[in-house]
Image (cartoon, rainbow, N blue to C red):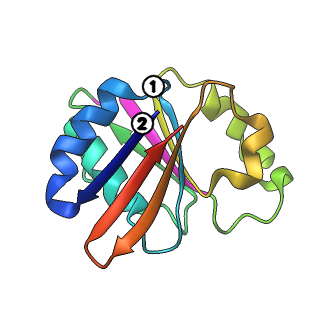
């Protein structure tokens, strides 16, 4: 679908493109540790005008981001620490996937069978210390 090479200085423009071009508001990020998954999500949330700055939900698994009116704009998941799909089901992942807004998921492999067919998958590759390649399918 899209294949983009970018640097951190390109994130504002890249996030604007992604918001317009992504086929779904359920967005899954596939990338190695340190590739910039959370950094890209922060840029997208800033472009969407979330009322608070994004942070990695590594220890809490999910962060909720409101808009300027306090309405939930997005959920951001980091599923790295989950070991089984049952753990995701126990905290209600299926309800979050039915949310009528943005859902960003880091490390989505464990719940692939629960994702809707139209979920967007973003693969980020590290080309060098400052350059990334983003492939969207």
Q: Position of residue 127 (x, y in %)?
A: 37, 71
Q: Which class describes the residues within 10 Å of circle 2: few (<14), some (14-19), or many (20+)? A: many
What SS does tag 1 mark?
loop
- Residue 14 figure quarter: top left
The residue tagged 1 is 101
Residue 60 vs residue 44, the one in the foreground: 44
Residue 71 vs residue 37, the one in the foreground: 37
Magenta region includes residue 76: yes
Q: Position of residue 66 (x, y in %)?
A: 33, 36
Check the image and report above or below for 13 versus 125.
Answer: above
- Taking the image as shown, residue 83 lies to the left or right of residue 10, namely right
Check the image and report above or below for 38 versus 129.
Answer: above
Q: Which class describes the residues within 10 Å of circle 1: few (<14), some (14-19), or many (20+)? A: some
- Residue 101 figure quarter: top left
Q: Quadrant of the C terminus?
A: top right
Which label number is shown at residue 74? 2
Q: Position of residue 64 (x, y in %)?
A: 44, 44
Residue 89 vs residue 103, the one in the foreground: 103
Mark found first going from the N terminus, 1 or 2: 2
What residue is shown at x 48% (from left), y 61% (from top)? Answer: 57
What residue is shown at x 32% (from left), y 30% (from top)? Answer: 19
- Taking the image as shown, residue 41 lies to the left or right of residue 95, namely left
- Taking the image as shown, residue 17 lies to the left or right of residue 38, namely left
Q: Position of residue 134 (x, y in %)?
A: 40, 51
Q: State the extent of the magenta-drawn residues as a range.
A: 70-78
Which label number is shown at residue 130? none
Q: Is residue 50 visible?
A: no
| Majority secondary structure of magenta residues | strand
- Residue 84 figure quarter: bottom right
Badge 1 vs badge 2, beta-carbon distance below 8 Å: yes
Check the image and report above or below for 70 versus 43.
Answer: above
């Amino acid at each position: 679908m899209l294949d983009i090479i970018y640097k951190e200085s390109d994130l504002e423009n890249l996030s604007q493109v992604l918001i317009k071009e992504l086929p779904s508001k359920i967005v899954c990020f596939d990338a190695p540790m340190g590739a910039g998954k959370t950094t890209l999500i922060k840029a997208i949330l800033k472009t969407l005008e979330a009322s608070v700055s994004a942070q990695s939900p590594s220890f809490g698994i999910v962060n909720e981001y409101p808009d300027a009116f306090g309405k939930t704009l997005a959920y951001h998941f980091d599923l790295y620490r989950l070991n089984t799909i049952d753990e995701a089901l126990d905290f209600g992942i299926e309800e979050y996937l039915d949310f009528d807004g943005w859902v960003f998921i880091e490390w989505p492999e464990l719940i692939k069978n629960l994702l809707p067919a139209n979920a967007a998958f973003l693969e980020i590759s590290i080309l060098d210390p400052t350059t990334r390649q983003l492939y969207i399918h």
